[in-house]
Amino acid sequence: MGSHATLTVPTPERMGRLGRELAALLRPGDLVLLSGELGAGKTTLTRGLGEGLQVRGAVTSPTFVIARVHPSLVGGPALVHVDAYRLGGDLDEMEDLDLDVSLPESVVVVEWGEGKVERLSEDRLEVRIERAIGDTAGEDHDPRRVVLTGIGPRWAGVALAELG
């Protein structure tokens, strides 16, 4: 159950636009799992999501705070941006993060969450960002391959392939 798409994203600007387009598909309670190496474009994508959801505050990598809440400016869902890189175990401790926000009413984006957040929800959107070509690491303008996988009933029939 769910849907799947693979997109080639040539530039960081396009990655931001993909985030804005993706935001249009998201609903309160959605869990988005972002994976990809450092510098792959996870924060750029999340910044686009924040723009699309019209939330307050600059979306930056939440590395030092583990989670950052961006309230909606337009009465929509808040964006909760979580960096699970330094969280041990799974995210049962999500409540321990003391977020002043209800997760079912928010869009939750988790970086480095593989193996930690899957049990939070049977429905999730997994977004994997890969460098599309060989060893040009360090270049900001090499294309990315973005693999979108919608898991669970929430994503059945969602036309992810129409993004981009």
Image (tube, rainbow, N blue to C red):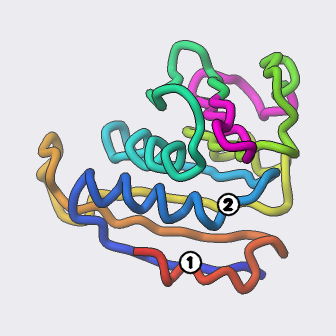
| Residue at x-position 83% and y-position 39% | 103
| Residue at x-position 49% and y-position 83% | 162
Residue that mark 1 sits on: 160
**In terms of image quadrants, where is residue 110?**
top right
Relative to 138, 24 lies left or right:
right
Q: Main secondary structure of the magenta part?
A: loop
66 in relation to 55, above or below: above
* x and y, in percent, of residue 158 in the image: 67, 80
Amino acid on which disc 2 is placed: Leu
45 in relation to 10, above or below: above
Queried whether the magenta region covers residue 73, the answer comes back as yes
* x and y, in percent, of residue 4 in the image: 58, 79
**In terms of image quadrants, where is residue 140?**
top left
Label ID, residue 7:
none
Q: Which portion, as a residue range, is magenta? A: 70-92
**Of marks 2 and 1, the one in the foreground:** 2
Residue that mark 2 sits on: 26
Quarter of the image with the C terminus is bottom left
Mark 1 closeness class: few <14, some 14–19, many ≥20 residues within 10 Å: many
